[in-house]
Amino acid sequence: MPPVLILAAGRGERMRPLTDATPKPLLPAGGRALIDWQLASLARAGVRRVVINHAHLGERLEAAVGDGSRWGIRVDWSREGTALETAGGIAKALALLGDEPFLVVSGDIYTDYDYSRLEAVAAAIARDPGRRAAHFVLVANPSWHPGGDMALEGGLVRREGARLTYANIAVFHPALFEDIAPGTHLRLFPWAYRFVDEGRVTGELFGGDWENVGTPAQLAALDRRLSR
């Protein structure tokens, strides 16, 4: 399996006051931290190398996760100080991720997505990055995001069409981020739309269990469901 970058640098403003003293990925649901669920799922898929970026209360995140040995993986840390947003954070972590395609997942989602499915996708991107540079996992629009983010047509991600929601799961070729200077603050969108417009971003619709845990109410609902 390719290496994985877990995005964990956000402040979690909508989660306050819960995130005033606890990094959002360490918030518990079903008796386990959100990032614990994510790391366990990645390990089951065969992932052995993980990079985690952080900014807010990063030392607490490092203390809780350690070197990853309890999941049978190796964890390295990309320390940002000030959160660089998604594209900026990926660019800063490139030196730890290597020269081949890698997965990017959010540290605050809960899902039963089988990450091993992306091994073949990463291999295809590595073979011909000029034609295929990234892959996005999309989900049906949740009630809190009815307008979606992008469309999927013939296996390619499009800006226009019947819109779906970006699941915060993707595969990228590192060359996409090589022109971003380390330390640059840059969101993934709209920056990444240029690759969508070039027809270089494939996608898939995932219909399984997926939750973006963005508010205390969403966290409480997930906790109740996982505690049954």
Image: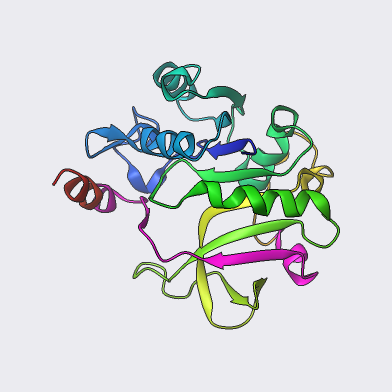
How many tags in the picture? 0
Location of residue 214 in the rendering, given as x and y in whole percent from the top left corner: 37, 51
Q: Tell me the quarter of the picture where residue 88 sits.
A: top right
Q: Nearer the viewer, residue 22 or 46?
A: 46
Protein image colouring:
rainbow
Evaluate whether residue 172 shows in this view.
no
Q: Which residue is painted at 59% across and 37% down in the image?
A: 5
Location of residue 210 in the rendering, given as x and y in whole percent from the top left corner: 38, 57
In the rendered view, tell whether residue 188 sits above or below residue 39.
below
Q: Which residue is painted at 77% across and 45% down in the image?
A: 177
221 on left or right of 95: left
Residue 210 shown in magenta: yes
Location of residue 113 in the rendering, given as x and y in whole percent from the top left corner: 44, 52
Q: Nearer the viewer, residue 113 or 212?
A: 113
58 on left or right of 150: left
Evaluate whether residue 22 shows in this view.
yes
Q: Tell me the quarter of the picture where residue 82 sits.
A: top right
129 on left or right of 157: right
Furthest residue in direction left, as rendered: 228
In the rendered view, tell whether residue 144 sits above or below residue 8.
below
Residue 206 shown in magenta: yes
Q: Which residue is painted at 59% across and 45% down in the image?
A: 104
Quadrant of the drawing holding the N terminus: top right
Location of residue 170 in the rendering, given as x and y in whole percent from the top left corner: 60, 52
218 on left or right of 163: left
Q: Which residues are magenta?
A: 191-219
In the rendered view, tell whether residue 90 sits above or below residue 127.
above
In the rendered view, tell whether residue 215 sits above or below residue 164.
above
Furthest residue in direction bottom, as rendered: 161
